[in-house]
Amino acid sequence: PITRHYMFDIKLQKVTRLCQTRSIVTVNGQFPGPRIITREDDRLVIKVVNHMQNNITIHWHGIRQLKSGWADGPAYITQCPIQRGQTFVYNFTITGQRGTLWWHAHSSWLRATVYGPIVILPKRHVPYPFPQPFKEVPIIFGEWWKADTEAVINQAMQTGIAPNLSDAYTINGFPGPLYNCSTKDTFKLKVNPGKTYMLRLINAALNNELYFSIANHTLTVVEADAVYTKPFKTNILLISPGQTTNVLLKTMSKAPNATFVIAARPYATGPATFDNTTTIGLLDYEESPLSKTKAKNKNLPLLRPMLPKFNDSTFAMKFNSKIRSLANEKFPAKVPKTVDKRFFFTIGLGLSPCQQNQTCQGPNNTRLAAAINNVSFVQPDIALLQAHFFNKSKGVYTSDFPANPPFKFNYTGTPPNNIMVNSGTKVVVLPFNASVELVLQDTSIIGAENHPLHLHGFNFYVVGQGVGNFDPKKDPSKFNLVDPIERNTAGVPSGGWVAVRFLADNPGVWFMHCHLEVHTSWGLKMAWIVLDGKRHNQKLPPPPSDLPKC
Ligand code: C2O
C-alpha cells in the first residue's frame, strides 16, 4: 500500500453553459472536479485549501472511514467548515473497498458544482471478478443552474417553499444538444468495435434520480456503490443521487453505420413539479464509416434509447431487486444474521412553523419541512463529533432520537390531520459492534416519494423492500440474508419501505440523510453515534491538529 497526495484548491472559476457564463465554485478550477485514482488499502492525503468567501467541507462519499471519522466531511456533523484562507488535510485509508465512489462538497448546496469521481482499483495483481475491460470511463451525472445555487437554496429557505428547478441535467458537466445552444457541450464516447468498456456511473445530481440507457447496447451491471454484484444484463439503469454503478459495455463486433445516443432523464415520484428534460451524450465507433464522412453530413440519424415513464415505480422496484451481492467465497456477504437493535423510521415531508427571520409562503404561515420519525434535524453550531468526543453534548444535541415514529397511522394511506413536524438535533447512540436493523418507511403526508437514503461510515445490506406499509409480522420472514446488495445509498420506495442491516463497527458520528439535497435542506437527516469499543483498536483516535474550528 502507498500514500497518495492530492491538492484541492477551492476557488471560483468562470464556466459557460446554456449560453451563460457564471462564476462557480470548483476544485483546482476544474468542472467536474479532478478524478482521484487510488487502490484498495492505499492511504489518501488530500490537502484542501479554501480560497473563496464561502465556508466549505469535502465528503468522500461511500468511503468507510474506519476509525478516521474526522475525515468524513459533512459540515457540523464531523467537522466545522473550512473557512476562507484555511486549510484542512483529509487523511484516510481505503479499507476493504474497491470500485467507484465519489467526492463532493458537503455544506449547503455547494456540491452542485464541487464533485468528482473516486476510482479505487483492486490491490495490485488482483483481477476483477469479470472480464478485464479494454478501457474504463467515468460518467458523472449532474444538474446545472443558470442562477447561483447558493442563492437558490437561501431564497427557498427564506420563503419556505420549493427551490427553483435546475435548468439542465449534465453528463460529465455537459448538458448536451437537447438544451439551448449546447451542441458543442456534448459528452462524446469514442469506442472501438468488439471491445469491453467499463463505465463508472455516478449520480451527482442534486435532486433527481435518473434513468440511464445507451441506444442499441446492452449493459451488464457488475458493481454498485463499490461492491461487486452478481452480473446482470439490462438496457436501462436507475441510479439515485449518491449511488454509483459500474457497467460493462460490450461494443458491436463491427463498427456500425450509426451514432448512438447516451441518455439520462429523471425518475420522479414526488408531489413537486420537476424538470423532465433529457441530457444526452453520443457514442461513436472509431472506425465507423460514418465518422469519416461526418464533416460533410450534417443531418445524421441518431439512434435513441427508450426510457421508462418519469414515475415508473414498478420499474424502480424491479430494477433494485435485481441488484444482488456477488456473495462468493472471495467476496462474501457478511449480512448480520441476528439483530441487537431494531429501528423503524418514517421518512417524509411535512410542514413546520415559520421562523422569525423568514417570510413563509406556505399554508398558515408555515414552511415546507422534511423529517425522520417526525423529527426535522436542526444543524448544530459546532460539529457533533467534537461535542461527542470531548463530552460536550450539552446544548449541542440530545440522545433521544425516537426508535419508532411518535404516532401510528396508515403511512401510505390518508395523511394524519396534523402534518406539522418537530425540530431538534437528536441522535441515536449505539454501542460498539451492535447489529442494527433499520426499516425505512415512506409516508404520504404531503405525497409519497422515493427517497435515496445515504448512511455515512457504513455499507448496509438491503435485506428487503416492499410497497405499502411494512408488516413487522410477515415481511421479515421474506428478508434476503443470503446475497442482499451491500451499499451506502438505498431508495426508500415511493409509498413503500426498505429494510437494511449493518454492523456498528465504526466508532464516530455518522450522518444519515436523503441524498435529494432539497430534502436534506428541509431536515430529512439525523446522526448515529457509535461508541468506542473496549479494545485499543476499537477506539476513534483524537482529531487531527488542523481540524477547523467553528
Ligand atoms: Cu454524498 Cu452526506 O453525502
Image: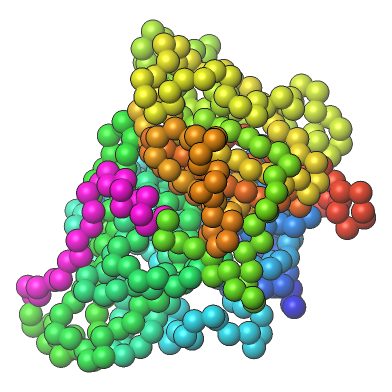
The colour mode here is rainbow
Whether 44 is drawn above or below 62: the answer is below
Q: Quadrant of residue 282?
A: bottom left
Q: Residue furthest top?
A: 364
Classify residue 58 as left or right of residue 298. Answer: right
Question: How many labels, in total?
Answer: 0
Which of 283/532 is in front?
532
Residue at 58% x, 33% y is: 344
Residue 385 place in picture, x, y as percent: 76, 40
Which of 224/242 is in front?
224
- Residue 212: say if magenta: no
Whether 87 is drawn above or below 269: the answer is below
Residue at 48% x, 27% y is: 370
Whether 312 is drawn above or below 36: the answer is above
Q: What is the span of residues highlighted in magenta in the rendered image?
A: 298-320
Residue 138 place in picture, x, y as percent: 44, 70
Residue at 71% x, 39% y is: 341
Classify residue 341 as left or right of residue 255. Answer: right
Classify residue 533 as left or right of residue 90. Answer: right
Residue 526 place in picture, x, y as percent: 62, 34
Q: Visible in this render: residue 15?
A: no
Which of 87/350 is in front?
350
Quarter of the image for the C terminus: give it.
Answer: top right
Q: Visible in this render: residue 374?
A: yes
Residue 427 place in picture, x, y as percent: 69, 31
Residue at 26% x, 75% y is: 217
